[in-house]
Image: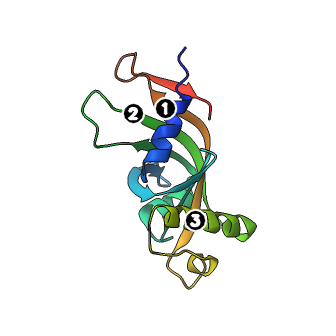
Amino acid sequence: MTDFSDMARGVIESNRYMVLGTADEAGVPWVTPVWYAQSDYRRFIWVSSPDRRHSRNVRARPEVSIVIFDSQVPVGDARAVYMSARAEELSGAELERDVALFDAAGRAQGLTRRWALEDMLAPSPYRLYRGTVSQHWVLDPDSSPDDRAEVTL
């Protein structure tokens, strides 16, 4: 079996947006793109309003899916990372740690907006969320179009 770990890392490192898949209490799915910062390919962090549909869904059902891919490649050259994760709104020491990571990632990518702890606490309209990944998969380019290979990162 081919080891696709380097390919998965490259996809995660070279992209800025991930597609977050959530579901509400009744299981109705919803997907949304979010800008992300990541740590160790297992912690994916994003900012959102707690009133947004995907944030409400995370409160109702913390099990989420994540996909990261480059939408600019030609057909047949697709590389994507699929992930299963558990999402949560952050608080306490985890919030302090991850808001610093989110801010540093944003500055490294040229964003002018600075993020600080007070930006994630009421009465601010924003909260910080994290998806902790339990499994990663990639498309297996040597297989049929829908075959995915699990990778360890």
Identified by mark 3, the residue type is Ala
Separation of disc 3 and disc 1 at Cα?
24 Å
Q: Mark 1 is on which residue type?
A: Met
> Whole-Å distance between the Cαs marked 3 and 2?
26 Å
Observer-nearest residue: 13 or 28? 13
> Furthest residue to the left?
75
Q: Quadrant of residue 75?
A: top left
| Whether residue 109 is situated above or below residue 145 in the rendered picture | below
Residue at numbered disc 1: 7
- The label on residue 102 is none
Residue 79 is labelled as 2
Extreme residue in the right direction: 93
Marker disc for residue 104: 3
User: Around disc 1, counting alpha carbons within 10 Å, would you say few (fewer than 14), some (14 to 19), or many (20 or more)?
Assistant: some
Find out whether the residues at labels 2 and 1 contact each other: C-beta distance under 8 Å: yes
- Residue 66 visible in rendering: no
Q: How many marks?
A: 3
Q: Is residue 100 visible?
A: yes
Give the residue displayed 59% in from the left and 44% down from the top: 41
Question: Reading the chain from its start, which is encountered first: label 2 or label 1?
Answer: 1
Q: Nearer the viewer, mark 3 or mark 2?
A: 3
**Residue 37 percent coordinates (x, y):** 54, 57
